[in-house]
Image: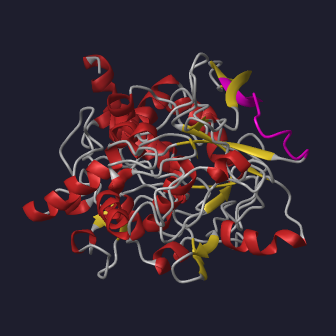
Amino acid sequence: MRPLFRRLFPLLALALVACDNAETPTFSQPEPGEALSGGSTTVMKFDQNAYSMPSANLAPMRRLDFSVGNSFFRNPWVIAPASTTARDGLGPLLNTNACQNCHIKDGRGHPPAPDATSAVSMLVRLSIPAGPEHAEVVRERGIAPEPSYGGQLQDMAIPGVAPEGKVRLRHSTEQVRFADGTEVELRRPEIELNDLAYGDMHPETRMSLRIAPPMIGLGLLEAIPEEALLANADPDDRNGDGISGRPNRVFDQTSRQTVIGRFGWKAGQPGLNQQNADAFFNDMGLSTSLLSGSSCTDRQTECRAMPDGGEPEVSDDILAQVLFYTRNLGVPARRNVDDPQVLAGKTLFHRAGCQSCHVPQFTTAADAAEPELANQLIRPYTDLLLHDMGEGLADNRPEFEASGREWRTPPLWGIGLTQAVSGHTQFLHDGRARNLLEAILWHGGEAEKARQIVLGYDQNERTALLSFLESL
């Protein structure tokens, strides 16, 4: 920051005090322990490996378990039959051959480049309007899958099987103007599917782009008590603040019951083990004891005729090792929490009401699945609830109880290290936002009031707000 600009920020902070209403806090000092986003699990790593470190409080022997899980997350799976029996059974249809290919350095995926041969770290989810005949599959999967292609387009395949198709993106653009006259161009992705190998899709097919989210802090999110999540739910907006978050309620394959969803862009998965099993099944064509059989549809006869790697292809032991790894990826510490510009940005974040959905902190449960994750004061900046984000972000594809306009609030912790880890700054569920400011400006629906407040911020205020977000 330029020296003069830095000296002016205390004055800006005073100005904020003068114009804020009584309900908006002003932050002139960091809160105690604020830099430790993951409590005692927080890691002190800020380069391209910032998302790939084990929780700081893992004992040495537990770090060995973490490394074993990492090997199954990172290394490629192979086609069956193979001498590598612990890693065979890939496909026949797939999006990638290793988890790390989507979650590069355990970070955020991105849309494919125009000349890319496959989408890799971006998926296209598919479904059709559900009828009475789909009742059972909707109860378990939350959607009615497209009859020929299933619930997810798989644009890669093993030899002898045709990939389902190729994904291409076009973009339309629109301009947004701030109160000071500054204009920002926003881009909206439009899906184009080419070379469909198994016939035309259902005429009412709904498609939704999804990029791979960061992997940090997932065990901590899983350890937030259910009652703490429900305390923030206000589906009828009884307090009249325009925010009506609600939990998604999804099917748990282990208990065979409907429970609260926490993971995925629409909170469509109840826990990490099922989230991991779903990725193995749909992204790599690998069965587990949770999701058995094949991801090939009945109409994909060549796919169904291919040899498999046994049942299940991912053993319970391997699934447990991957679960341990994904639960214990540490959250990086925040940077510059005492910087005047960052503190001013924090005040502006609260003035806009962003904390109503991006809830700053929780305390994890005493009986968390791993002892290192228990009783931690964490700062994820999410409520894990569904919110109507308006028509601009709508994919018009319901998932369990989530409507086509609703999305789970994504955690913000670690977001300022996206460039360092992933080499890009493409945000939101489909990567349409090329930076954090664009991501803010796509907010609508329940966040429209916050968006309008941000549109009133001048250049200095916008810089401060972004400095706060980049410190997370």
Q: Is residue 419 above or below residue 373?
A: above
Q: Position of residue 303 (x, y in %)?
A: 65, 48
Say if the magenta span includes residue 194.
Answer: yes
**Left or right of residue 250, residue 48 in this image:** left
Q: Position of residue 86 (x, y in %)?
A: 33, 56
Quarter holding residue 361? bottom left
**Left or right of residue 196, residue 25 in this image:** left
Q: Is residue 255 above or below residue 140?
A: below
List the single residue furthest toward the left: 60
Q: Is residue 356 above or below residue 107?
A: below
**Left or right of residue 183, residue 231 in this image:** left
What's the magenta region?
Answer: 186-203
Residue at image position (63%, 33%) is: 455
Q: Position of residue 185 (x, y in %)?
A: 66, 20
| Residue 47 seen in the current view | yes
State the residue in front, 108 or 22: 108
Describe the colour scheme in one phrase. secondary structure
State the residue in front, 178 or 431: 431
Quarter holding residue 199? top right
Say if the magenta span includes residue 77.
Answer: no
| Residue 175 seen in the current view | no
Residue at image position (70%, 44%) is: 208
Residue at image position (66%, 58%) is: 387
Q: Position of residue 116 (x, y in %)?
A: 56, 21
Quadrant position of the C terminus in the picture? top left
Quadrant position of the N terminus in the picture? top left
Residue at image position (52%, 62%) is: 384
